[in-house]
Image (cartoon, rainbow, N blue to C red):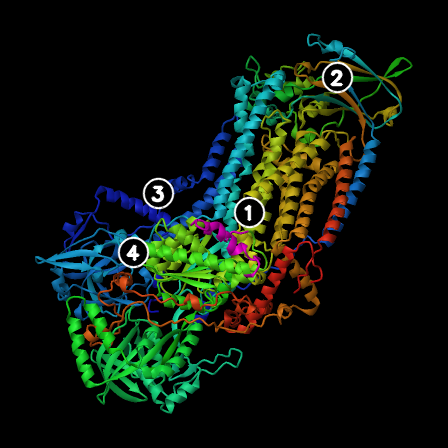
Amino acid sequence: MVKEEKEIANRPDNTAFTQQRLPAWQPMLSAGIVIPGFVLIGLAFIGIGVALFVTSRSITVLEIDYTGIEKDSACFKCSNADVKNCVCNLEFSIDSLFEGPVFFYYGLSNYFQNYRKYAASRDDEQLSGDLDAFTAPSDSCSPYDYNGNDKPIVPCGAIANSMFNDTFVLYRVVNGANKLVPLDGKGIAWWTDYNVKFRNPSVTPLKNAFNNTVKPIFWPKPAYQLDASDPANNGFINQDFLVWMRRAALPDFRKLYRRITDGEYAKGLPAGNYSLTIAYNYPVQSFEGRKKVVFSNVSWMGGKNEFLGIAYLVVGSLCVLMSIVMLIVYAKFKFPEED
Amino acid sequence: MTVPKDIPEKWFPLVLPLKRNKQKGLNGATSKKKRTEEERKVRANDREYNEKFQYASNCIMTSKYNIVTFLPVNLFEQFQEVANTYFLFLLILQLIPQISSLSWFTTIVPLALVLSITAVKDATDDYFRHKSDSQVNNRQSQVLIRGSLQNEKWMNVRVGDIIKLENNQFVAADLLLLSSSEPHGLCYIETAELDGESNMKVRQSVSVTSELGDQNNLASFDGEVVCEPPNNKLDRFCGTLYWRDKKYTLSNQNMLLRGCVLRNTEACYGLVIFAGPDTKLMQNSGRTKFKRTSIDRLMNTLVLWIFGFLVCMGVILAVGNAVWEREVGFLFQSYLPWDPPVDNFLFSAFLSFWSYVIILNTVVPISLYVSVEVIRLGHSYFINWDQQMFCSQCNTPAEARTTTLNEELGQVEYIFSDKTGTLTQNIMSFNKCSINGQTYGEGSDPLGPQPKRLDFTPFNPLADPDFCFYDDTLLEAVKVGDTHTHKFFRLLSLCHTVMSEEKSEGELLYKAQSPDEGALVTAARNFGFVFRSRTPGTITTTEMGRSVTYTLLAILDFNNIRKRMSVIVRNPEGRICLYCKGADTVLLERLHPCNQELMNITSDHLNEYAADGLRTLALAYRDLSEDEWEAWSERHRSAAKAASCREDRLAAAYEQIEQDMVLLGATAIEDKLQEGVPETIAVLSLANIKIWVLTGDKQETAVNIGYSCKMLTDDMTEVFIISGHTVQSVRQELRRARDRMIEMSRTRDGKEEGVEGCFMGNGFREGQGDSRGGEKQLQCPPPPPSNLMDNISGEFALVINGHSLAHALEADMETEFVSTACACKAVICCRVTPLQKAQVVEMIKKHKKAVTLAIGDGANDVSMIKSAHIGVGISGQEGIQAVLASDYSFSQFRFLQRLLLVHGRWSYLRMCRFLCYFFYKNFAFTMVHFWFGFYCGFSAQTVYDQYFITLYNIVYTSLPVLAMGIFDQDVPDQRSLEYPKLYEPGQLNLLFNKREFFICIAQGIYTSVVLFFVPCAILSDATQSTGVPLADYQTFAVTTATALVIVVSVQIALDTGFWTVINHVFVWGSLGLYFSIMLALQSQTLFGIFPNQFHFVGSAQSTLLQPVVWLTIALATAICIVPVLAFRFLKVDLKPQLSDTVRYTQLVRQKKRKPAGRSVGGAWRGVGSVSEGRLGARGSSRRSGYAFAHTEGFGELITSGKNMRLSSLAMATFASRHSSSWIDTLRRKKHSHTNTPPSASGESSPAPSCVSGSIPPLSNSSSVLSQTLNAGVLTPAALRSQGGDSPGSWTISLGAVQEALLRWKGRASASNSPVKLAE
């Protein structure tokens, strides 16, 4: 009796798990699955690729470099760093209707917003409206945390300090007269940035929150005066500031400047001549950077992106090709199916 | 067994894992330094005097830590591991703000996890060590203090104390036996714990002290012992006792060693000579090494390479950083000023190097080590849980005692096996006999109905109920009173040295020195000739119910040279008769010429028995006249008294009387193999594993077992015997054997058109004249298909004797020996000492770079078990020392095939797949940073969120690969047993090696390229449908991370071959977990609490809603996976591995069988027709095996009456006084030793017959196994039935396997023409 009990104690459990007999699916790369699978994947990719390619083709993009390095460039005169408050006019024409809604971007190249120290040079607590961080910015902002007089800089850090400050005004030239094209600067930043990540301190007026702080060194105006026209668009929730603070992943990038959605331009920019007045403030020549403006419309899949369509087409075709090769190989070295 | 079952466990601390011993050793060394002990002086009953020498106390300490030292010591130990130090170093780097490219928690979280898990494990281990230490140290022993016996704990026993031992007690320390309750100061001990020999040994005290007797005298005993310092020689002790101005020489005969058990002796007193760590047992627990698997070593090398790689990457990126800072960063300073201390591009590059070391460190994540441990632990549990390795007779499951070696089980090439208790059960059974030309015993028709077991009780009330015999004709012959039969059994009942014990009337207990003798006397007992008792001068038997007392005139004892023993007795009628039993070779020469005809018949029978692997003895008698006896007796007396050459003169005297004998017949004893041994050996050798038997047994016994377990077969081309006594002769014999092999393989080459040349021929021709050449011969590329049969049957075997082995193991002979021995299919080393066993293993390890496994059951196998890569202990036979020293233990040899072919193979496969995938996934993950470096000014900016980096290895990707590493199976277990060739990839190290590693790395790097550049190309221009560009850093990070997780998940899905529920849960769960954790970490709630920690707020929601992002991920996944898929498909199609084929056929079969129900066996039926069971292939070779155990007989002891005691307790297996160990005996007699090759080379069949009939059988027939599995419950009966009792079933599967393998091979060779792989 005792022995029997002991036996039960020692004998391993007879379960599917302990005996490694769990029911299992044992996939095998058999020809019946792999070859049709490749054909299907290939066809799907080709289909998607065609759709993407066609869509991408329908998107119009207008890109104009205004760095002003070249002598014939409209902004050549501004490219000299000594010239202050330079304004230049960029003329361009559109041959046919630039279908709307049209998005207006500015672009920078050779600009390393993804440099580690640059990226870290910000104080998220300060930017989320924490007044303690106003008086004592985080070390990560160094050397843009305090100015020469040991006054805290708000907003601190290299990113904020280097905010892009060229401004653009677009005119449609109608019969020789410049007609202002209204630009919509609302909602160009991420929803979470505007509503969650960046907050102004709950001090009214906003200016008081910035007492005993100084504006970033490169800024002409303090943060609470960024947008004179719209008092709500100031401080850390200024749309342009938000766009700038969402730093780019790659050294050549563009950022959304404005949307052209108002009134008669809702359908797009009509054919004709346009004049872009640029307040040229942002120096890029020192590091061989380029500045450009981009007008583009979008489809369901966003802006123009030929690479995506082509890549899909290539991968799809390769899959189909591969399936043919495999079929040939399989037919030649046929696995003994019969047994 | 007489050992109480619970005692061995208490001895756990005696066999200590190495580390602890090493520490011990160190301590010992330091104390030795203080005072190098050259000789030991011990004075009895004088603690003060002995304390001067500061001898070690009897307290043993095997634990490593105490509560205070645990944390520092354990941490110190853990940081000795390179990996841990490396991570600590990284952690320190990360604390330097200038270079910290990652938060400190990315390293500290995994590191803390790893350290604490290990610490908990170490603490638990040490706790148990403390417990067992104190258990042993607190055992009670009776110490004689100031004239009275006091109970003292073991740990308080001091050198010089006199302690009293009682029957069945463990000896507490190494004692000098002073006196005993038995006459002549004798006492009996069992040394199983010490040397594995389960028979009892006699120890005798020096005569002066044995007279001391009671404790009062002992208390005043003040003798002083001067002896050698502590050492580990179990069979040697040399010292001198000085007492009352006299010197007495002490030897091992006077010593009781710690670890022995006192038996059959009421009490004895001993003087403590060595205590605690100085005892021979502790000194012998041996140098143990930390075992690492070859995968471990490879992994360590690879990790080093990866570190090198890491440094290279760091250097490249640092150079990039220098250039960038000089060319671009310098100009970019207005937006991105250099830090004041970094005002130099070179310094910046230096910092960047360290920063990159930090972010690229994930190529060797700490989770690698943890995961490997977890997987091995899982595999160990599966071994422990395996019901098919559970022995219901002994109620012991298999146990993986080490959790770190599992995958090495899949790579074993050499198995070193003990014989007794491992291959055999060490049970002898009287199986057959030949009486006066008539053979009796089990019918040789295995297919016929099983004969009924004879019931002896009605005929003979004294019969032993356990005795089995199946042939009733013999019983009939006895009953009708056939004189020859009667004489035959009378001889068996008289001619032996067995002691009997009769506790109550008719309840006889025989104590035999060798189990053979016990079996013979028991057989006689059952057939009506019952040996009842003996005195020095008489033997009392009950013959056919009538009590008869014979006068014992002389015992002509057995020894190795004589190979026979005789007794001369006078029966009650006064007739004198000499009865002799012995090896046929010796005995048949000494017969009276008139026996010729009978001799021929008997000799045929003997050959038949020997061919069956039975141990044979021939029996003869001679009637002596009173005059003859008187004359001889006189001569014998004078020889016995001779001062010089006593032994030679005795031998001559014996020789004189043992002449002109009349042959009675022969006996055949079966040394019962363990269940399933031949089948297991057959399967293992099909798996290309070479099996060496290392045994302490005599050559003949060992060879016999070799035959009966089918290691040696009559189809072997040749069996070489090496038994030279000098270096030269051994060398010559080895060379000759090699030359012969070359010759034979040449002739075979010629005969078979070189088809199989590769296997032997080529290697040999190259190797001629070069002693190293032989090493290459087995390393031919996969043997051509037609070799398969030859691999199995017709090869060479080598038998080497202990003394020759000693020479062969000398440094300059090693290569010679290895090259010869490794060319042989089977190697048997007999008469080896425990140390030699270890040396042989070490030698193979040194010369062959192969994985070795040692399996044994006794303490004499411990050294071998410890030196082999893997040590396996057979539990439940002899002591438990082997088990304690082993890495795996189970109770049946046959479980070895399951351990290796199923568990080992799976473990290896899983570990390799795990490692491949693991390196792949980490390279794919980490190298993305490298590519990103070129776009971010080499600033060590990470691509991913730091939380992703922290969690990637420990959460997002760990579980699916663990599930694969633990549960994956390519083919089901019964298939791995059916196709032993599936084991080969492990031996050849094909699944994970440097090449495979580079492939994984390349795949990982390829994936990282795709994962970086595809999003890079697509996102740089892409925008959301709201026009917001997607090229911001956070979107990029989320996209790449998601693509990475998806790609590696798809890859693991491809790698997983066995999708259990758990795999599904883990794979899908990990993906789900990734998304939920990411969404949680980027949620507004968390940001609200720690705005500085969670920069990524909202990125996931925003990014994952974009169709372009998903298109990017899909594209990246396709580009990564499609080539892999195509490659794998083509590989399976063009170059299928055996496992692919097996898996494929398995699937097809399953599909087909589904409607008809599964009965796998049926399909395989009708192929094989091999129907010989245990009988095996019968050849023409003539072998003789004779049954006698290790040591000389004990005739002298019996006749001297020394061991005869009044108490009926007595039953001794004594040890002849002058043979302190058999090796000494051997040495003394070596010049006169003659060797009889069991197989004369000329007589053996020269060429392998190469037919399926000679193939060793396979066990685990598919039908039996699958039916059992289908039944769902493994009944013990079903398990047993696999063991080989049913010859029919395994032979069928054997044929099937052979055929299947052949076909597969055939297919492989003719890859252009598709061959059907029929079932």
CA gap, disc 4 to disc 2? Answer: 91 Å
- Local SS, label 4: helix
Residue type pointed to by label 3: Val
Residue B11 in view in this figure: no
Q: Which mark is residue B992?
A: 1
* Residue on which disc 3 sits: B68
Do circles 2 and 1 both sit on a common chain?
no
CA gap, disc 3 to disc 2? Answer: 70 Å
Residue lying farthest to the bottom in this orientation:
B480
- Local SS, label 3: helix
Tag 1 subunit:
B
Residue type pointed to by label 4: Leu
Question: In screen coordinates, is B834 left or right of A36?
Answer: left
Q: Earlier in the sequence, mark 4 or mark 1?
A: 4
Do circles 3 and 4 both sit on a common chain?
yes
Q: Position of residue B1145 (x, y in %)?
A: 66, 60
* Residue on which disc 2 sits: A167
Question: Alpha-carbon neighbours of circle 2 within 10 Å: few (<14), some, or many (≥20)?
Answer: some
Q: Is B1015 rendered above or below residue B1187?
A: above
Residue type pointed to by label 1: Phe
Q: Position of residue B574 (x, y in %)?
A: 21, 88
CA gap, disc 3 to disc 4? Answer: 30 Å
Q: Nearer the viewer, mark 3 or mark 4?
A: 4
Tag 2 subunit:
A
Whether residue B767 is in magenta: the answer is yes
Picture quadrant where residue B627 is located: bottom left
Do circles 4 and 1 both sit on a common chain?
yes
The range drawn in magenta is: B751-780
Query: Is B1178 or B188 nearer to us in this picture?
Result: B1178
* Residue on which disc 4 sits: B281
Q: Nearer the viewer, mark 4 or mark 1?
A: 1
Q: How many marks?
A: 4
